[in-house]
Image (tube, rainbow, N blue to C red):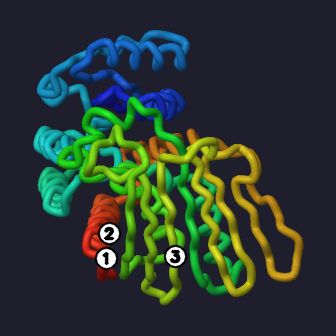
Amino acid sequence: MLQIALVGCGVIAPQHIAAFAKQYERATLSVFCDLDMEKADRARAHYEKLLGKSVGSRIVASYEEVLADSTVDAVDLCLPHHLHAEYAIAAARAGKHILCEKPLANTLEDCDRMIAAAREAGVVLFHGENMRLDPVVNRAMELIREGRIGIVTGLQQTYAHWQPEAMNRGWRARPEEAGGGQLMDAAIHHVDILRHVGGEIVQVQAMTTQHRPELGPESEDTGVLNFRFDRGHLGQLFAGHATRNRGGSPLLTVFGTEGSLTLEAFWPRRGLVWFPANNEPQVLIEHHHWQESFDAEIAHFLDVLLEGVPLRATPEEGRRNVEIILAAYTSARTGRLVEV
């Protein structure tokens, strides 16, 4: 059984903990690491509640202690963006496998350093992009490959929700730490989905704005991104966290010459609907929950480590997502269409 250290016990940690609890026969969260020991203690308590028992997991504040622990096989990094590179490289040098939450890093140079360190150490660097592994997204991919909607002619993605004000403060309000605003923090998820479903993005045109001043003057909360894909079709993403009553749900429509698909990956109703040409819509996946994407992410990470299956969310894919978001920022700043 693998021993995993959860490093960073903040806002996204409960989703990771729940997913690991479902994989208890294969891996244990043996260490909870956070500078705030109360957060780490709450994270451990949540894990034990889900398991229905204590498994002797430790709480530590020192990452160096995690790296020095020979029983720890891998680290799950749920940290502020600016720490990803430093912590991942240190883990690689200590011989630990790495699951790193998105974005892989804030700069392409840091992405390259992380990839090189993992390759040199012979460890897995898993880009933690849960949406790429979501069952709804992957079922849609199967339908597209089967030709159910003909040739893809375009994609339109909406990600609109109201982010809690507390999450708009601290490091997220400091672009030098967050790598930007909403685009780097959340829209990057949906860039990955668009690339996964629609093919490679080769041109980006973007506009950004801000409605929520607590972010500070330099961090956008809303952006509209237009894309050209390598196969010639176009796509669009509206991403913002200044919208009430929508929830964090992305609605993606994939348009084709013989029909369309809609994906609602965070909501439990009508997760995937197929609109065939000249026929009634068919609900292909109805019951679905956002947590399923994290469950799939953690299960795949363990499949890679324990069974040697090919990595489906590679660090190179994570680097490409960062490259596209950085191109969007360049476009928003200059008003130009940017080649990627």
Residue placed at 35% from the left, 32% from the top?
2
Instruction: For mark 1, give the secondary structure.
Output: loop
The quarter in which the N terminus is drawn is top left
Dot 1 crowding, Cα within 10 Å, few <14, some 14–19, many 20+: few
Q: Position of residue 263 (x, y in %)?
A: 65, 60
Name the amino acid type tagged 1: Gly
In the picture shown, does residue 268 fall above or below 314? above
Instruction: For mark 2, give the secondary structure.
Output: helix
* Residue 332, label in figure: 2
Discs 3/2, front: 2
Determine whether label 3 and label 2 are within 8 Å by CB: no
From the viewer's perspective, tell me whether residue 101 is left or right of residue 143: left
In this figure, which residue is indicated by the disc labeled 3? 235
Which of the two labelled residues, at mark 3 and mark 2, occupies the earlier sequence position? Answer: 3
The span from disc 1 to disc 3 (Cα, nearest Å) is 18 Å
Residue placed at 77% from the left, 59% from the top?
284
Residue placed at 65% from the left, 77% from the top?
255
* Residue 335, label in figure: 1
Dot 2 crowding, Cα within 10 Å, few <14, some 14–19, many 20+: many
* Residue 99, label in figure: none
Residue placed at 17% from the left, 40% from the top?
87
Instruction: For mark 3, give the secondary structure.
Output: strand
Q: Position of residue 249 (x, y in %)?
A: 59, 49
